[in-house]
Image (tube, rainbow, N blue to C red):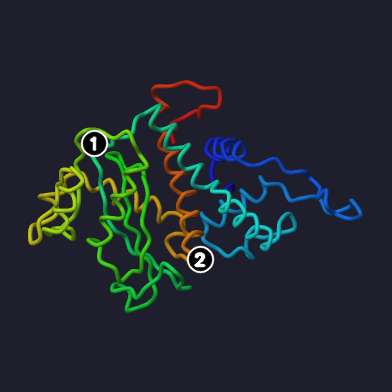
Amino acid sequence: MPVLPSWLTEPLWDQFAALLPPRPVFDPAHPLGCHRRRISDRVVFDKLLQVLRFGCSYEAIADSTCSATTIRARRDEWIRLGLFAKLKQLALDAYDRIVGLVLDQIAVDGAITKAPGGGEAAGRSPVDRGKRGMKRSGMTDGYGIPLGRVLAGAHRHDSPLLAPTLYLLDGLRPLPDEITVHLDAGYDSDKSRHLLGERGLHSRIAQKGTNAPIQATRRWHVERTHAWQNAFHRLARCYERRAHVINAFFDLADTIITVRSLIRRAWTTHRWDTRPHRRH
């Protein structure tokens, strides 16, 4: 059983392969010219997808085709080259060009997940008996397409993370003239409203003490996106200790979510040779 359907993995790999630098099959610097053949990038890419989806260790995924050391080494190499961030940006650009990002309606919210291994983005979780946890302050467009996130310890409140999360909008220009940010009651403070006013953003903030269904507005999109991200078990229970590795896995998961949404929404309006037979 493949970790993802072929109609999703093939376009992902095609775009990722285009970003890879040229590399010889054998190491030309080997003194005897008989170094072992380099493990295929496609094999390592598929292994990383398995790690992301199933959440298991690198040793559990490794087999005769690729070792755990190779997976980690190739992962770190691709992170240094910024390939996962570039892949995510390519997916966003394609979605915006074909479907269109709803940037006049933005939703921001925080989510706490487990981080048993601790690390740079872990802290004492207030909802898990003080165990190590991680918080992400995520931002989505009006449909729920993930635009970015800020990582912090689980003990951090949502409100102080709003400013660095909104800074991610600077990389999405050009932006609409009027943008409404939808927030839950955790951001119901004068500081949050002042921050939004400084950036020229409108706000729809739920008020404390009022039942949520009455003022649900459009922030449920970001909550649905958190659920989509938690379907990748490497993110729902994170054992990575370095923040740049966690962000790389988030970029890969956000790319999958974006491409999947693009294919599903374009299925009824576009035709292409490898179009799935039915809307999944």
The residue at the far right in this view is: 32
Mark 2 falls on what kind of element?
loop
Reading the chain from its start, which is encountered first: label 2 or label 1?
A: 1
Relative vertical location of residue 96 with respect to residue 144 in this rendering, above or below: above
Q: How many marks?
A: 2
The quadrant of the picture occupied by the C terminus is top left
Q: Which mark is residue 8?
A: none
Residue at position x 49%, y 48% in the image: 252
Residue 67 as seen in the image, left or right of residue 96: right
Q: Nearer the viewer, residue 206 or 73?
A: 73
- Measure how far apart labels 2 and 1 are at the Cα level: 34 Å
Q: Position of residue 154 (x, y in %)?
A: 33, 69
Residue at position x 64%, y 57% in the image: 71
Residue at position x 55%, y 35% in the image: 11
Nearest-to-viewer mark from 2 and 1: 1
Q: Residues within 10 Å of mark 2 (few under 14, many from 20)?
A: many
Relative vertical location of residue 211 with respect to residue 98 in this rendering, above or below: below
Q: Which mark is residue 240?
A: 2
Mark 1 falls on what kind of element?
loop
Q: Position of residue 40 (x, y in %)?
A: 71, 47
Q: What residue would you read off at disc 1?
A: 104
Relative vertical location of residue 263 with respect to residue 204 in this rendering, above or below: above
Q: Position of residue 263 (x, y in %)?
A: 44, 32
* Amino acid type indicated by mark 1: Asp
* Amino acid type indicated by mark 2: Glu
The residue at the far front in this view is: 198
